[in-house]
Image (cartoon, helix red, strand yellow):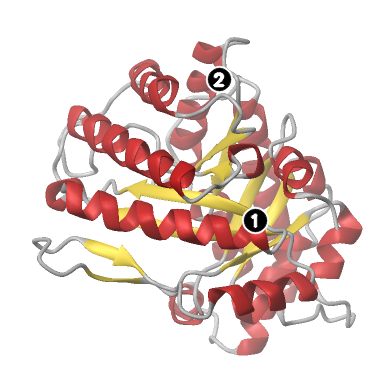
Amino acid sequence: MAAPREVAASMVAPGKGILAADESIGTMSKRLAAAGVPPSETTRRDYRELLLTTPGIAAQVSGIIWCDETLRQSLASGTPFPAAARELGIQPGIKVDTGVTPLPFADGAAVTEGLDGLRGRLEGYREMGATFAKWRAVLAPDRFSPRAAAANAHALARYAALCQEAGLVPIVEPEVLMEGSHGIGRCEAVTAAMLDAVFSQLSLMGVDPAGIVLKPNMVIEADGSGTRAEPDEVARRTLGVLRAIVPADVPGIAFLSGGQSNERACANLAAINAAAGRGAPWRLTYSFGRALVSDALHAWRGDPARKAEAQAALAANCARASAASRGACGTGDGGGG
């Protein structure tokens, strides 16, 4: 198996990003039902097989994140999902956190759990073929505090250290949520405080920054703020935070979409890359979930005859994201977020 530094670099290769298809069984079942697909182990498998087998997807996607169920499944052909991904030149990844829980004495802030038994689980996932893992910390700006930052940063750093010990690349994902009414300035301040806490803890835990992929939010206003920042402002504020905090030896930053539509997320990503130019020490790309796959799910609706249409929708969204990672993208705002 390739070393974490080598895998991390491949995950942020030029023009490529990471597809997040790691919804839990419960969340994925709800999304299938909302699209008119009876949820089951088989339909969840069929949907994720549709994503992986989209023609040409490996030209824009370097890695795919799955949940535990999918990593253990096989395609209809009998090929295990991790092996099928590797045959395409796509890194297979696994979500390893177990979700959020209220943080004591923190005014409603949450902390992500899943450290218990993680060393053994990571070893098992590596044996199944996973090359990277993901852990998502969730920060709500209206409930943010130094205590919440410290707890989540510590958990992320312990997870990242265990991943590297197991030979896996950790995706480090501290997400400042778009939900709420806060403005872009509040998002900027909370994002900076959280990233500062995360990199302090990563250093303390001995994590090699050249063997991780950072997956942060863009600096953007809340969906209920009543305002809408233009891509140039999102780019300026986002790059300002990253340049102040993120070490230069981190190979790449793969932004989450956070509820933005594909078009808006890509317009902002394109602006970030255009503003960074050749001066950024890291690759600036994407790790989108719904912003890539929602259109495909709603086109498919469980009908085998609509598979090609669904895959075409995914391919179009991936192509737009790939272009944005190179600094070129349209600025419309339709499609699924």
Per the image, label 1 sits on a secondary structure element best described as helix
According to the picture, the residue beneath numbered tag 2 turns out to be 273
Element type at mark 2: helix
The reply to whether residue 319 is in sight is yes
- In the image, residue 285 lies at what x, y percent? 60, 34
In the foreground, 266 or 159: 159
Q: Nearer the viewer, residue 335 or 327?
A: 327
Left or right for 85, reference 142: right
Tag 2 near tag 1, CB within 8 Å: no
First in sequence: mark 2 or mark 1? 1
Taking the spot 47% from the left edge, 69% from the top edge, the residue there is: 97
Label 2 neighbourhood size at 10 Å, few (<14), some (14-19), many (20+)? many
**Above or below 201: residue 332:** above
**In the image, what residue type sits under mark 1?**
Gln
Q: In this view, does 108 lie above or below 125?
A: above
The mark total stands at 2
- Kindly indicate the quadrant of the structure image that contains residue 81: bottom right
Residue 124 coordinates in the image, percent (x, y): 70, 78
Residue position marked by numbered label 1 in the rendering: 164
